[in-house]
Image (cartoon, helix red, strand yellow):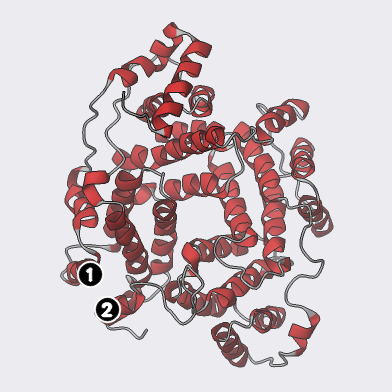
């Protein structure tokens, strides 16, 4: 008998656990039995986008950018279609199961948003950079011959029998086929409902990629269209199952949040809540920020549950979570504070939890914020003083906006995080316009590698700055400044003296200055 792979073994065990727990008749209702019997799923195709999707998977890295720029110049392609096709190529190739692959997917919508902030001559630049990363990884993964996703046919189920609880049961059982089938049935009814029910599985663990992948996939749906929404969202289903397989294989205990969340929802009557609209004063917001930042994860989660039960507006609770995450970036004493560091991860996850809370039902709004607080809480493990320190502030005396921007640019290029932060803090305190600072930092987010996180974190800060009250919003921008100064000139492996792969070629093809 041939040796069974770890994934196949765990999936088989999980499938047995799930079927044993729910019974054969219910399994049939959920559509699990037909999915298991389908030994040869059909290839996944994307209608009118299929030729462009295939091109993304079949074109060599050296030919990709010249080919795409030529199509853009001749008017045969627009940036939205380019991002849509690249996202679908990524989904079909990796299915949410490859680290660099899902990082490339999570950068797609942010790159498109950045392109819309740029003049037409530069608009393709952030997108081409991300597509270069995407195509390189597709090639390394073996291209079309090794793509992961195949078609899933939703089965007929009884009304109300397929929901987030059933999906969560399948993901906890590490049953890939069962989870895929349940979710396909949900998606066949309504994309919005499927996304809402997906959150039961997303909330089952506090891992940054789990939540950010779901959020960034949702933000791409306007580009890929309703017919392809299921393809992007099912990546999160597969990610959750894959994570459960890994947890079981490593002998790890179940995440604390699995028992904590239902207890808090029950204790504070948040299963079907009427959420409040009470706004926090600045002092009250600061108290909640401090509690979340300084407390153990379970304590932070309960503080958020209590605030929601007391009628505090979800937006204010989310604002506190986001600012607590930002405190990690400002207080970290590590020499490198970009990429997969605690502050960037916490900020991206807080942004994702908040964004999910805005588009799901009241139960999931409450649950997302509770889990979000648990996720980013670090028990105050970093230093007490945030960047910039007093010594940093003393190094910047300029008051003119243009001079402060020049100080910022020079500090980033010399990796001087403290001086860069001081320049922006002074800039904001003097009432200068934030758009020019974002312009400087956007340029570096495009040109530098950023350890795969530059685009995401830039857009996270853009969004959180806009949604945060004036007394606190510049903290987010200072966090982005730190990460930008940390990232400048470094590869993903921390080798200095390099720009992002593909960036200089893209500049040359577009005829813009690198």
Left or right of 392 on screen, residue 443: left
Query: Quadrant location of the N terminus?
Result: top left
Q: Spatial distance from mark 1 to mark 2, Cα to Cα? A: 16 Å
Residue 75 image offset from top left, x and y in percent: 18, 67
Q: Which residue is mark 1?
A: 62
Left or right of 351 on screen, residue 497: left
Residue 439 image offset from top left, x and y in percent: 50, 77
Q: Which residue is mark 2?
A: 510
Residue 380 image offset from top left, x and y in percent: 79, 57
**The quarter of the displayed image where residue 430 is located:** bottom right
**From the viewer's perspective, is residue 432 above or below residue 291?**
below
Secondary structure type for disc 1: helix
Residue lying farthest to the top in this orientation: 25
Measuring 58% from the left and 75% from the top, which residue is drawn there? 486
- Residue 160 makes an appearance in the image: no
Asked if the residue at tag 2 contacts the one at tag 1, i.e. Cβ–Cβ closer than 8 Å, the answer is no
**From the viewer's perspective, is residue 286 above or below residue 265?**
below
Measuring 32% from the left and 68% from the top, which residue is drawn there? 128
Left or right of 298 on screen, residue 141: left
Q: How many C-alpha atoms fall within 10 Å of the one at disc 2: few (<14), some, or many (≥20)?
A: some
């Amino acid at each position: 008998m041939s040796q069974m792979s770890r994934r196949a073994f765990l999936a088989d065990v999980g499938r047995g656990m799930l079927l044993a727990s729910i019974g054969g008749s219910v399994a049939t209702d959920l559509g699990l039995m037909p999915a298991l019997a389908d030994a040869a799923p059909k290839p996944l195709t994307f209608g009118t986008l299929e030729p462009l999707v295939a091109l993304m998977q079949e074109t060599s890295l050296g030919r990709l950018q010249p080919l795409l720029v030529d199509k853009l110049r001749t008017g045969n392609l627009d940036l939205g279609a380019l991002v849509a096709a690249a996202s679908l190529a990524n989904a079909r190739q990796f299915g949410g199961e490859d680290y660099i692959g899902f990082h490339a997917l999570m950068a797609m919508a942010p790159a498109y948003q950045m392109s819309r902030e740029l003049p037409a001559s530069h608009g393709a630049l952030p997108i081409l950079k991300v597509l270069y990363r995407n195509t390189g990884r597709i090639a390394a993964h073996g291209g079309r011959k090794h793509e992961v996703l195949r078609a899933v046919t939703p089965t007929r189920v009884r009304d109300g029998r397929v929901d987030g609880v059933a999906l969560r049961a399948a993901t906890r059982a590490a049953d890939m086929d069962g989870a895929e089938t349940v979710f396909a049935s949900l998606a066949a009814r309504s994309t919005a409902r499927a996304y809402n029910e997906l959150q039961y599985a997303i909330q089952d663990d506090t891992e940054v990629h789990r939540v950010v992948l779901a959020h960034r996939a949702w933000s791409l749906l306007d580009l890929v269209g309703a017919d392809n929404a299921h393809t992007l969202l099912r990546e999160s289903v597969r990610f959750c199952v894959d994570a459960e397989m890994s947890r079981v294989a490593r002998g790890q205990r179940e995440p604390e949040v699995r028992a904590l969340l239902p207890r808090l929802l029950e204790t504070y009557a948040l299963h079907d809540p009427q959420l409040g609209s009470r706004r926090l004063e600045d002092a009250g917001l600061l108290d909640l920020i401090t509690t979340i930042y300084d407390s153990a994860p379970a304590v932070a989660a309960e503080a958020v549950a209590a605030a929601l039960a007391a009628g505090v507006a979800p937006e204010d609770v989310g604002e506190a979570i986001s600012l607590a995450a930002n405190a990690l970036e400002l207080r970290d004493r590590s020499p490198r504070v970009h990429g997969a560091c605690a502050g960037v991860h916490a900020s991206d996850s807080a942004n994702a939890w908040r964004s999910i809370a805005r588009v799901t039902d009241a139960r999931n709004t409450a649950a997302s914020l509770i889990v979000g607080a648990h996720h980013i809480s670090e028990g105050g493990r970093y230093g007490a003083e945030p960047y910039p320190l007093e010594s940093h502030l003393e190094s910047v005396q300029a008051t003119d906006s243009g001079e402060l921007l020049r100080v910022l640019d020079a500090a980033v290029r010399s990796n001087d995080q403290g001086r860069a932060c001081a320049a922006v803090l002074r800039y904001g305190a003097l009432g200068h316009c934030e758009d020019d600072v974002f312009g400087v930092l956007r340029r570096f987010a495009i040109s530098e590698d950023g350890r795969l996180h530059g685009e995401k974190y830039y857009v996270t800060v853009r969004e959180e700055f806009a949604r945060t009250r004036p007394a606190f919003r510049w903290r987010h921008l200072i966090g982005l400044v730190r990460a930008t100064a940390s990232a400048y000139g470094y590869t993903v492996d921390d080798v200095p003296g390099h720009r992002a792969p593909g960036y200089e070629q893209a500049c040359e093809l577009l005829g813009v200055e690198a």
